[in-house]
Image: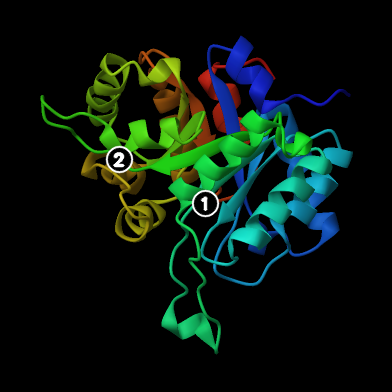
Amino acid sequence: MSRRTFQTALKTRDFAVTAQINLEDAPNVETLLKTGETLRPAVDAVQLYDSTRMHMSGIAAAALLIQQEIDPIVHMNCRDRNRIALLKDMIGAAALGVDNVLLMRGKKVPDVEKLGVRSVFDVPALELMAYVQSMKETDSEPELADLQIGANAEMFDPKANWAPKNLLKKCDAGASFIQLQPCFDLQVTRNYMSHIVASKLTHRASFLMALAPLPSADAARWVRDNVKGALVPEAIIERLEQASDSEQEGVDICAEQMQELATIPGVAGANLLTLGQLEMIPAAVEASGVRAL
């Protein structure tokens, strides 16, 4: 089986799909590869989330997945490494076949987990993006030539005169795909994306919406209360609470939302988070009909 790639999907598909792997839930090679195989038929790439907890290196996980013809998107946080270490890791990742990196500032290490660990924050994500872009333009590091840089952003319900100045800066710095946080309020998504389209940013970057097949009302509340910027309307929580089979209801909601997202101008695809059983992600993608499995 040939490797399906995220970059190709953004160029040729009306709706790209990725899924996020929490590496702390894949503590060994066997689990990681089984996870990748479960997701492979449903997605164009897997995103390797970098948390504050101890887990396998995202670059090591990416190398293992590439051997299985699964395209990885490696998350890299400025929290953990200085500029030199981050650049070395990016060059190394590209040499191993990684084509996509999502650069973020990264969350602070919680006090309860610190145990003497210090956050680094040597370089802001925006500055690092710009530096990598300059290296690509000058061919000073040929391994980086095809590396696609992504950035994250929070979605909200903007006022009529809002302009996406921060996103413009990220695109100017070299970001070519933008990952949004979970939003189950499609009216907010439509309003937000209408401003993005009007600013012509969709000519410069692909915008991915984050969703999840929510396994329960409690999981929906957890996302609402703990994921920064996440938007989960009360109506979604009530549907899950009233359902006789909350996992199936979560799959149905996710499928319905993907169908709607595919109709919103400027939306390039969705990134699905794993909050319940892994098999819920392929089930939601299949039920949505946004791609043939």
Frontmost of labels 2 and 1 is 1
Which residue: 47% across, 24% down?
A: 205
Which one is nearer the viewer's eye here, 247 or 143? 143
Look at the picture and state if 58 lies above or below 118: above
Q: Position of residue 284 (x, y in %)?
A: 55, 31
Q: Position of residue 189 (x, y in %)?
A: 29, 28
Q: Position of residue 160 (x, y in %)?
A: 10, 24
Q: Find numbered disc 1 in the image and state the secondary structure of the residue it sits on.
A: loop
Which residue: 27% across, 31% down?
A: 164
> What is the basis of the colouring in this image?
rainbow
Question: In the rendered image, is residue 293 in sight?
Answer: yes
Q: Quadrant of the C terminus?
A: top right
Q: Earlier in the sequence, mark 2 or mark 1?
A: 2
According to the picture, the residue beneath numbered tag 1 turns out to be 275
According to the picture, the residue beneath numbered tag 2 turns out to be 236
Q: Quadrant of the N terminus?
A: top right
Report the side of 136 relative to 32 (left or right).
Answer: left
Q: Residues within 10 Å of mark 1 (few under 14, many from 20)?
A: some
Res 97 → quadrant = top right
Report the side of 77 relative to 292 (left or right).
Answer: left
Q: Are marks 2 and 1 in contact (CB under 8 Å)?
A: no
Question: In the rendered image, is residue 244 in sight?
Answer: no
| Identity of the residue furthest to the left in this view | 160
The residues bearing labels 2 and 1 have C-alpha atoms spaced at a distance of 15 Å
Which one is nearer the viewer's eye here, 249 or 211? 211
How many numbered callouts? Answer: 2
Q: Amino acid at mark 2?
A: Ile
Q: Amino acid at mark 1?
A: Leu
Report the side of 206 relative to 233 (left or right).
Answer: right
Report the side of 284 relative to 43 (left or right).
Answer: left
